[in-house]
Image (cartoon, rainbow, N blue to C red):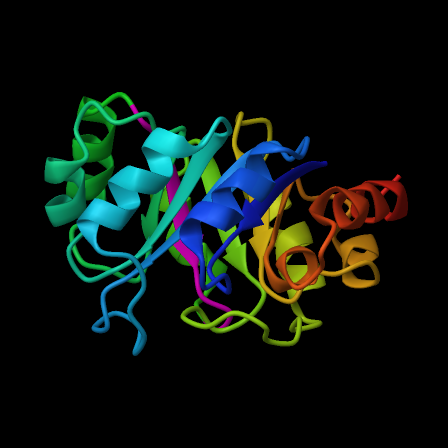
Amino acid sequence: MEISLSILSCNDIEEAINKVNNTNTDYLHLDVMDGMFVPNTSYNIEEIKYIINNSNKKIDAHFMVKDPIKYLNVLKEYNLEYFTFHVELDNVKYLINKVKENNYKVGLAIKPNTDINVLKEYLDDIDLILVMSVEPGMGGQTFISSTVNRISEIKNIIGNRNIKIAVDGGINHDTIKLINNADIAVVGSYITSSTNYQEKIDILRSNNE
C-alpha cells in the first residue's frame, strides 16, 4: 500500500515539506478547503503553489471546494499527480473533462454518508476514488468503522477497471490494518504529530503487510 502524507495539521508549511521530503512516503497529500464546501479553510493559491514547487514527492491534491475550476485554472502546468474533487458537486462529468484537459489524473472523493452508487456513471473516466473515512474538513478525527465495508463494495463496482482506492481520515498504526484492500492510505496527524515522520511511516507499512 502506498502512503500519502497530509500536512494539514502542520503550522509551519516550510518545515513540514522539508520533513516530508526526507521520508520515503509515496505522495504529499494536499488538502484544499474553501470554507464553503466544508466549514474550514486551508491553503491560499500562493501557498498551494509553494507546496507543489518545494515538494520532491508526487502531489495528491484533494479539493474540498465548491468550485474546482477556479483552482484548475490557476494551477495549469503545475506538477500534480491526482486532482481529486467531490462527487457530491454538480456537473461532475464536466469537471472530469476539465481535469483531463490539464493532463492530471482524475480523483473522485466521496463523503462517508454518500451512496456509493453515485460513482457508477463515472467509473470509465476516473483514475482514483478517495473514500473519506471521516467527515471531510478537519484533521485528527476518528476512523469511521463502516468504511471497511464501503471499500469492499466500491472495489466490487470498480470491477477490473484500473482505478485506485485511497482512504482518508483517522488512519493510524491500528486502523491501517482494517483497510488492507485499499491502494493508498492518506495519513496526517498520526505522522505529523511525531518528531520522526519516517519512523511512523515504517510502522504503518509494517502493520499493513
Residue 110 shown in magenta: yes
Q: Quadrant of the N terminus?
A: top right
Residue 142, position as x, y percentages in the image? 65, 76
Q: Is 93 left, or right, of 188 in this rendering?
A: left
Q: Is the magenta stretch mostly helix, strand or loop?
A: strand
The answer to whether residue 198 is above or below residue 189 is above
Residue 116, position as x, y percentages in the image? 48, 58
Q: Identify the residue at image location x=48%, y=73%.
A: 135
Residue 17, position as x, y percentages in the image? 49, 42
Q: Quadrant of the C terminus?
A: top right
Q: Identify the residue at image location x=61%, y=31%.
A: 26
Residue 68, position as x, y percentages in the image? 19, 50
Where are the magenta residues, as a range?
Answer: 104-113
The answer to whether residue 194 is above or below residue 15 is below
Q: Quick check: can you spot residue 133?
A: yes
Numbered circles on residues, count: 0
Q: Is 130 left, or right, of 182 in this rendering?
A: left
Q: Identify the residue at image location x=63%, y=33%.
A: 22
Q: Identify the residue at image location x=68%, y=51%.
A: 152
Foreground of the two, 29 or 43: 43
Residue 95 shown in magenta: no
Foreground of the two, 153 or 66: 66
The answer to whether residue 145 is above or below residue 104 is below
